[in-house]
């Protein structure tokens, strides 16, 4: 079945360093969504990418969707302690709206 | 606050027991999704309801069942509980059953099976 793989599983950075997480799908995706889950919290929607090669920015966060629509990345510039959490990518799991989530990248930031 | 509510927040029970988790979607949302989050498996899709009807099933065990009521709240029933069922259970809601629609997650129910 469809799989969404995400690497790395963990990333420890010093505050101010950059961070990137990568997401790869076994199939072409119509769209990809990114969520953030703070420690002890619930997943919160960040962004959706739909077009091939699309790049979207939210302040220090840059999201990319690959040309083949099978991979995506999230890059954070100059991390801050508020960026701590687990970042998930998610692709469509079927025609009814359910999502297939990657296992997430857990980011810790040392002040 | 996502507008999605889940009760209870925590649940501790014994193996073999049955529990019911409750979810109220955001006002206006017709779709409810249930997910299980465990340490080694990440977020696993269980089941999806739209306007009272089951729309999709994921990795949901036969011991688990769900329903969505006319007022659109949903319940997830877990029976014959095993130690491995201990996890966080999230529900999420969206307006329509589309993979391009944003899903809003509730705070989750942490289930501990002893």
Image (cartoon, grey):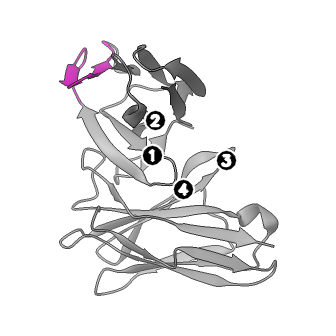
Marks 4 and 3, Cα distance to the nearest angstrom? 18 Å
**Alpha-carbon span between mark 3 and mark 2:** 17 Å
Residue drawn where x is 51% and y is 30% of the image? A107
Q: Which residue is mark 4?
A: B58
Question: Which of A26 and A111 lies nearest the eye of the viewer?
Answer: A111
Say which label, 4 or 3, has the lower sequence index: 3
Q: Earlier in the sequence, mark 1 or mark 2?
A: 1
Q: Residues within 10 Å of mark 3 (few under 14, many from 20)?
A: few
- Asked if the residues shown at circle 1 and circle 2 are in contact, with their CB atoms under 8 angstroms apart, the answer is yes
Confirm whether circles 4 and 3 share one chain.
yes
Numbered label attached to residue A38: 1
Query: Callout 2: helix, strand or loop?
Result: loop
- When the figure is inspected, residue A103 is found, relative to residue A52, above or below; the finding is below
The disc at residue B39 is 3
Q: Residue at x 34, y 78 (%)?
A: B52
Q: Evaluate whether label 3 is on the same chain as label 2.
A: no
Q: What span is in magenta?
A: A50-67
Discs 1 and 3 carry the same chain letter: no
């Amino acid at each position: 079945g469809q799989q969404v793989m995400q690497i790395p599983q963990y990333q420890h950075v010093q505050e101010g360093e950059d961070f990137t997480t990568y997401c790869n799908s076994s199939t072409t995706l119509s769209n990809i969504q990114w969520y953030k889950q703070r420690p002890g919290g619930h997943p919160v929607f960040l962004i959706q990418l739909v077009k091939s090669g699309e790049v979207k920015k939210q302040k220090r966060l840059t999201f990319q969707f690959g040309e083949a629509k099978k991979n995506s990345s999230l890059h954070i510039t100059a991390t801050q302690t508020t960026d701590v959490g687990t970042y998930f990518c998610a692709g469509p799991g079927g025609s009814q709206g359910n999502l297939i989530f990657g296992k997430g990248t857990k980011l810790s930031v040392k002040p | 606050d996502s507008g999605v509510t889940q009760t209870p927040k925590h649940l501790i029970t014994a193996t073999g027991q049955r529990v019911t988790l409750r979810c109220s979607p955001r006002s206006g949302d017709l779709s409810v999704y249930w997910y299980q989050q465990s340490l080694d498996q990440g977020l696993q899709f269980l089941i999806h309801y739209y306007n009272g009807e089951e729309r999709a099933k994921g990795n949901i065990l036969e011991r688990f069942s769900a329903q969505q009521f006319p007022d659109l709240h949903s319940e997830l029933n877990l029976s014959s509980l095993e130690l491995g069922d201990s996890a966080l259970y999230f529900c999420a809601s969206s307006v329509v059953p589309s993979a391009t629609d944003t899903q809003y997650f509730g705070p989750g129910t942490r289930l501990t099976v002893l």
